[in-house]
Image (spheres, grey):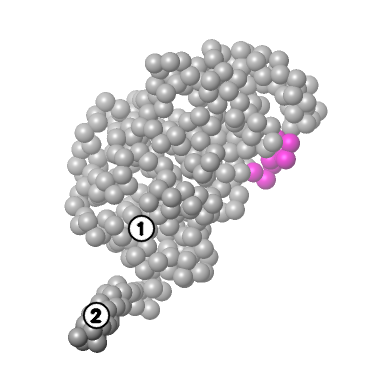
Amino acid sequence: MKQKLLFTLMVTFLISCGGKQDDEQKTQLTPVEEQTLYDRAKQLFGALPDKMPGSENDTEALIELGKKLYFETKLSVNNTQSCNTCHDITNGMAGVDNKPLSPGAIEGKIGTRNSPTVFNAGFQFAQFWDGRSPDLVEQAKGPILNPLEMAMPDEKTVEKTIAAIDEYKEMFNKAFPNVKKPITFHNIAVAIAAFERTLVSKSRFDDYVNGNRDALTVQEKKGMKSFIDNNCIMCHTGPLLGGSLYQKMGLINPYENTEDLGRYEVTKLESDKYMFKVAMLRNVALTHPYFHDGKVEKLEDAVKKMAWLNLGKELPDNEVADIVAFLNSLTDKNLENRKQAKK
């Protein structure tokens, strides 16, 4: 009796394993599909460069100063906030605070848009959701003086505050040699931008594009194929998979939040209503909640919603799961442990 039971269990196990192997074989891409997908990935996306534009002029002294300023709470009106408060890069954080909208330095004040990641930000063609700043230097100035954020009253107050700290006097002199008055509001932003240009993240997707075909799983490759075939690449192309153009939020079907007019608030052009900078998708698995208003918490829901809003498609759950798997492959390898811990 025992032998019969054991035999039955072994047969059941073998059938089960065989079924799993058959399923896996069915999901495998053919060699032609593999090659076509790889070629398209190199053409449409490519690997992220090792350095950001402008970093060739950044010295170690300037970067060191910028790093200290990035974490400096005295850049806020009541010494409570730094750049890192909303764009957290510590303890495995992906350059965000994972809040829909970020609280400001002054109690009760809150920002009007979701804080985007600082990782890879300097590769983008413009900064902020509405593109109102052309580069990292101008972007760094904004939050410091914004009354809803760090709320410093003016540039002179910022300069006076930093100049009163002895350590900064030496650091600014090293970072800006031969400059008579190195501690200026502009130079503070220049230094912060230099540090931010070091925040380049590399992922398994970069390994794949650079030639390691085994860097991605079968599901991740299928997700990339779906991402391409469903025309997500209409907006999300280039090494960042985004960050290179403006697009209307609700191109096909309207987005429910009609209060934020997007780039229109900068240009006052009717055609710019509800236009926002396309979010880059690097580290997107860790930068929830999503969209300019932080209204969507889960990546699966964000994929579904964007497919409906801007492509007019209702994607089936299995295809959404594949696309999400692909998007997970864009996570910085140094942050992979955090991603795994969240599962």
Q: Amino acid at mark 2?
A: Leu
Q: Residue 327 at x, y = what percent?
A: 38, 54
Please give the range of residues in magenta.
55-62
The residue located at (58%, 38%) in the rendering is 196
Quarter occupied by residue 122 = top right
For numbered disc 1, what is the local secondary structure?
A: helix
Q: Are marks 1 and 2 in contact (CB under 8 Å)?
A: no
Judge left or right: residue 51 versus residue 4. Answer: right
Question: Which three-letter amino acid code belongs to the residue tagged 1?
Answer: Ala
Q: Which residue is mark 1?
A: 325
* Residue projecting furthest to the right: 178
Q: Pinpoint residue 123: horizontal percent, then vertical percent.
A: 52, 45
Structural crowding at the residue carrying mark 2, measured as other residues with C-alpha within 10 Å and reported as few (<14), some (14–19) or many (≥20): few
- The percent position of residue 130, horizontal first and vertical second, equals 40, 32
Q: How many marks?
A: 2
Q: Please identify the quadrant where the N terminus is shown.
A: bottom left
